[in-house]
Image (cartoon, helix red, strand yellow):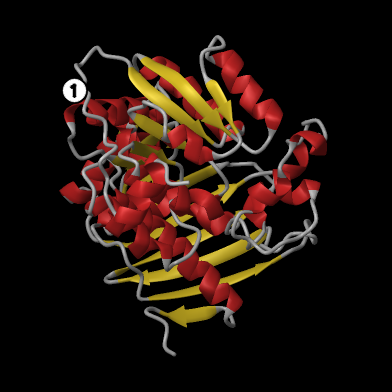
Amino acid sequence: MLNRRSFLIASGLTALASTRALGANDTVRIGVIGAGGRMRQLLDSADKAGPYQIVAVSDVYGPRRDAIKERSTGLATTHLDYHEVLEKDIDAVIIASPDHWHVRMAVDALAAGKDVYLEKPVTHTLEEGATLTKAVRSSKQILQCGMQQRSWTHFRDAVEIVQGGTLGRVTQVRTYWWQNYGRHDTSKPTDTEALDWKMWLGGAPDQPFSEEKFKRWRWFWNFGGGGMTDLFTHWIDVVHWAMKADTPRAAQMIADKYIYETWDCPDTLQAAFRYPGFDVVYEGMMSSSIDDGGLEFRGTEATLKVNRSGFSVYREGVESAQNPVISGHSFRDGTITHMENFFECVKTRKEPNAPVETGVAAARAGHIGNFAYLHGGQTAWPAKG
């Protein structure tokens, strides 16, 4: 039976775009798609970002739908199928599903005339980058990629320092992120009676339910891309932004599964990327969290070290007691500011701080690293043959 959504998809129209003109103080009406742990964090930030209302939620796991309904004081409708959320009278959707659903859900939301906040990585495969970019740029909708450093005050200051020449010539950027998954999982076992596993799989190959895959899907190729798309994506986006270059010419990666042997993706890895005029290196592991994550822009005159707490600049030839010569800090989670920017753009129709091209480029770098890993450890880019 032809309904409003199927008519629009069949005809290629995007007539469902909200005609409501939003004022600066108006409440943004939101649909929630994918209601797991990351969504809870995003909504915590949204709570501090401005007036918004959760109108509807979709998730394949019942307890997560119920939690969002409770959060909305009972106002949100609950749905198994995200298409039903897109049929609601909403201004935008926030998508925090597993990676293999990102582009499909975002494209459908754009076609339904909804603005989109899309968690990173915005793509699950290299090929999806063109699909997502075309969908955004052929619509009139706003899409904010979940690259919150783009709105984080001290990251913006750090990028200005790099681009202002204070560091001299930067020829290497070191990035790293260490986490310890063995110390984090205190969650309850999944109630499989409340889970639609087939719908969760979506376009992935059919396979039996796995607690590990459902909870740690980022580390299985069918659903995610491991550390290169989960963690490295954030840092390489900052590199692209600061260095004004977003496509590596070659990549190398050595990695292995030393701790989590049941995963597809490696738990310990080192990668190197060659960009025009500079190199980027990344290292990380999932069984040690000391030092957390950060970046180092190493230049001929100075080095800038930056993480989510702040940044410091260390000048060459200066006694250690006088270094760092410049430092800055943020006392507010950048995700709050990023959500503020998204809500503002929903109202003003301005370009968001993290437009689609930035998210696609950041994910692409991680995909290229994984491609190298799966093809003998190195690759030129574009790959030959």
Indicate the position of residue 56 as horizontal and vertical percent values: 49, 25
Relative to 343, is 15 above or below? below
| Residue at image coords 61%, 71% | 254
Of residue 286 and residue 2, the one placed in the foreground of this image is 2
Q: Which residue is mark 1?
A: 21
Q: Is residue 18 visible?
A: yes
Residue drawn at point x = 39 percent, y = 29 percent: 334
Q: Nearer the viewer, residue 375 or 304?
A: 375
Identify the image quadrant of the C terminus: bottom left
Residue 72 is left or right of residue 381, and the answer is right
Q: Which picture quadrant has residue 248?
A: bottom left
The outermost residue toward the bottom is: 385
Q: Please tell me how crowded label 1 is: few (under 14), some (14-19), or many (20+) other residues with Cα within 10 Å.
A: few
Q: Is residue 286 visible?
A: no
Q: Residue at x 47, y 80 (%)?
A: 379
Residue at image point 34% right, 64% down: 130
Residue 353 vs residue 142, the one in the foreground = 142
Residue 46 position within the rendered picture, expressed as x and y whole percent measured from the top left:
42, 22
Q: Given the current orientation, which residue lies at the most extreme front position? A: 1
Which amino acid lies under the numbered mark 1 shown in the image of this protein?
Ala
Asked which secondary structure carries label 1, the reply is loop
Drawn side of residue 346 relative to residue 96, left or right: left
42 w.r.t. 100: above or below: above
Residue 331 percent location from the top left of the image = 40, 21
Q: Quadrant of residue 283?
A: bottom right
Instruction: Tell how many labels.
Output: 1
